[in-house]
Amino acid sequence: TGAESVVAALEAAGAQTAFGVQGGAIMPVYDALYDSSIRHVTMAHEQGASHAADAYGVVAGEPGLCLATSGPGATNLVTGIADADMDSDAMLALTGQVPTEFVGNDAFQETDTVGVTRPITKHNYFAHGADTVGDTVGEAFELSRAGRPGPTLVDLPKDVTQAETDETPGPAAPPAGTDPDPNADPDAVEEAARAIEAAERPVCLFGGGVIKAEASDAARTFARTYGIPVTTTMPGIGSFPEDDELCLSWAGMHGTGYANMAITHTDCLIAVGTRFDDRLTGGIDTFAPEAEVIHVDIDPAEISKNVHADYPLIGDAERVLDQLTAAVREAPDAEAWRERCAEWKETYPLTYVTPEDEPLKPQFVVEAFDEATGDDTIVTTGVGQHQMWASQFWTYTEPRTWVSSHGLGTMGYGVPAAVGARVAADTMGEPDRDVVCFDGDGSFLMTMQELSVAVREDLDITIAVLNNEYIGMVRQWQDAFYEGRHMASDYTWMPEFDKLAEAFGALGLRVDDYDEVAPAVEEALDYDGPAVIDFHVDPEENVLPMVPSGGANGKFATAEDQL
């Protein structure tokens, strides 16, 4: 059948795991999965399926796979597809559709899925027949990871998946011309190399593209060979070890003061695999204002889109970094610059205070988990203040250990992402890796139903809810820019998450004081299965430093009264 052809194509392409929710229009594909080698994880909600597939792909380095039925099933995937699109994550979504003859007739559970998802996919397809549907699915799977990764979608009418065919899907391959030349123009590389040699204040900026291209080793070799200080973007966290003396951590709105100072004063910015989004740059006019910009990216559309590139290098991040490493003949004279960067580290450290008369600080919780776990621990998050503290106060040393929603900023990403990350680690033969999800009370409430999946599948994940009874980042902005009017951000009506965890069948713990943190962390990590710790933290704690939206990165606030 067409459905069996779909599954055969997925197996041939190397898909090992799928996340989804059953339904009428997708039922033939699920029936074909019954005897498949592909593991299917039934999620509680289709949004959870798309986030789990996204995170699976981030950790495994392979396209994630999610399925849903037509109509509401497909539209519930949209948030996760858009999230993957914004973060350039490889993922294939398969959606059921009403039979072809009913398309356009407002049939039961019909939605124009191709039309709805066209703006948020790398490409999407409508399957027209059982003879070709397998090849279409194989092509979509490979396209999702070709060149610049991103989500693809195939809409599967039920008559197509039910129909019989004598055709066997051919080898999966992306469309011709969609896998670009991995090498940058040699003359352009030579010009960029001369600019690096002449620089006095060079800085590397490693983005998420470094990790997606498996270029972290090449990035580390390049920076260390020439003694160039390194900043990262948030998606680039883990591409360069944060305990290396060259590392200035990540830059942008809530990045470190020393990373932002380095970018503000550099005369040569070597940016690799970044799209220069507004949360990184702040005001474009004040971003790296003294720098010649070398921009390495696989996607020519990103070159000079937001930040002008003086030296555009279009190609695969790993290959181009290797080209640059070979082309630079001598290291730039940057000893004084490295000393200046080290001084900024001393001047603008990430710190917080723990007065005895104030509630538990969330940063303390993040550090406690970091100290109790290994370097290969996978951290997932929702979106908000907890996301920033998890990125600031954890020392990341390896790629594919930071799994978060960046471009779309999706609250609720953390729990289903932890499910996907855990399944990926287990599939890769790494069951001993810890998976820790830092969530906020608002984010956790949005997708906590996926905890039932973690219990059913016996997934060893630990969820730390940094519960401040607010949508914390909104409350912080309201205090800074809206005269403290907490309209719709007060979440004092939250349930008791430790008891909810127990109702789901997970371990549930509550922590209110500093002396309870370490024992609770140890108990949760030792527990063989999903655990939730409801940390009641200071509701007035803010994320600092902070660059106000559109502001200059070099003029960051380090205290609330500066906002």
Image (spheres, rainbow, N blue to C red):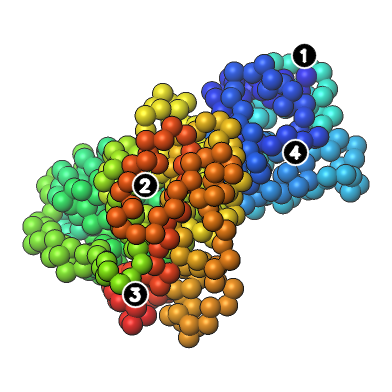
Of tags 1 and 2, the one toward the viewer is 2
Determine whether label 4 and label 3 are within 8 Å by CB: no
Q: Position of residue 174 (x, y in %)?
A: 57, 32
Residues packed near mark 4 inside 10 Å, few (<14), some (14 to 19) or many (20 plus)? many
What residue is drawn where x is 29% and y is 38%?
374
Please report whichever mark, 2 or 3, sits nearer to the chain's N-terminal start. 2
Residue position marked by numbered label 1 in the rendering? 166
The quadrant the N terminus occupies is: top right
Q: Is residue 36 above or below residue 104?
A: above
Please report whichever mark, 1 or 4, sits nearer to the chain's N-terminal start. 4
User: In the rendered view, does 143 fall on the left or right side of 97?
Assistant: left
Q: Amino acid at mark 1?
A: Asp
Of tags 2 and 3, the one toward the viewer is 2
Determine whether label 1 and label 2 are within 8 Å by CB: no
What residue is drawn where x is 33% and y is 71%?
358
Q: Nearer the viewer, residue 154 or 40?
A: 40
Residue position marked by numbered label 4 in the rendering? 69
Residue position marked by numbered label 2 in the rendering? 520
Give residue 338's quadrant in the image.
bottom left
What whole-number distance in Å separates the C-alpha atoms at marks 2 and 4? 40 Å
Q: Amino acid at mark 4?
A: Thr
